[in-house]
Image: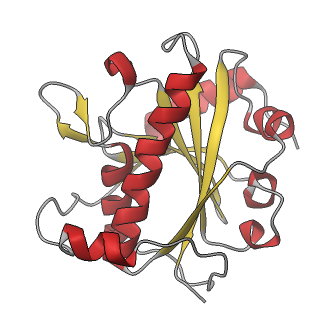
């Protein structure tokens, strides 16, 4: 099933589809040097669901506001363009992370995890994040690739701290995934990242 872009945009703005997340834990956690020591890529995942408090920490660390009064993020972006949207492909549907509300917006009920990559594990892992850049905001794709790397490394570090496994991926059918997600021509998928508890 394919979704019309207009329908997805409407769904993303519907208050009824807003799912609040618990407040992120902004203190504590694993010391930075220990998290760096434990950082690794994992490609085998259990089916265990990521609890909401852990998901909250993960999304905030990835692309949340650490200075909300200034609308500044946990990850840098070239010229502070903040061109990224962070989508979540889970077993119960496709979601968009709303950093301002620190909430999820339900986009569809469709499980598109297997479309987020060509490796077999992506279809069963509990979560695949999809980093989507708005090319109208950032004139250079080189900058967007660098910015996606900053987001990805934040994810790696919080996964190490939370006992999660993760792997960043560039091997996916961008055209197919773009169509399935109902993205606009100005939106470009840069990277996907699988997250879950190691098997």
Nearer to the camera, 54 or 33: 33
In the image, what residue occupies the spot 72% across and 24% down?
5
- Quarter of the picture containing the N terminus is top right
| Depth order, front residue of 92/195 | 195
Scheme of image coloration: secondary structure
Residue 33 is left or right of residue 132, and the answer is left
Rendering coords of residue 115 (x, y %): 80, 53
Is residue 23 shown above or below 120? Answer: above
Indicate the quadrant where residue 87 lies.
Answer: top right
Q: Quadrant of the C terminus?
A: bottom right
- Residue at 67% x, 66% y: name it: 91
Res 165 visible: yes
Where residue 6 sits in the image (x, y, percent)?
Answer: 69, 20
Q: Is there any visible trace of residue 14 in the rendered image? A: no
The residue at the point 30 percent across, 72 percent down is: 35
**Circle count:** 0
Q: Position of residue 12 (x, y in %)?
A: 54, 33
């Amino acid at each position: 099933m394919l979704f019309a872009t207009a329908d997805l945009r409407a769904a993303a703005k519907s208050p009824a589809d807003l799912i609040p997340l618990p407040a992120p834990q902004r203190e504590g956690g694993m010391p930075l040097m220990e998290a760096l020591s434990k950082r690794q890529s994992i490609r085998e995942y259990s089916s265990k669901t990521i609890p909401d408090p852990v998901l909250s920490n993960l999304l905030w660390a990835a692309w949340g506001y650490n200075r909300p009064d200034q609308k500044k993020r946990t990850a840098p972006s070239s010229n502070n363009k903040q061109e990224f949207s962070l989508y979540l492909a889970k077993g119960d549907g496709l979601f968009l992370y709303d950093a301002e509300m620190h909430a999820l917006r339900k986009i569809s009920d469709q499980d598109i995890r297997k479309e987020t990559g060509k490796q077999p594990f992506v279809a069963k892992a509990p979560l695949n994040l999809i980093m989507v850049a708005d090319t109208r905001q950032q004139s250079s794709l080189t900058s967007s690739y660098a910015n996606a790397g900053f987001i990805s490394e934040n994810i790696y570090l919080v996964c190490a701290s939370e006992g999660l496994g993760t792997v960043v991926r560039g091997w996916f059918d961008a055209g197919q995934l773009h169509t399935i997600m109902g993205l606009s021509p100005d939106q470009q998928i840069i990277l996907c990242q699988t997250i879950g508890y190691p098997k």
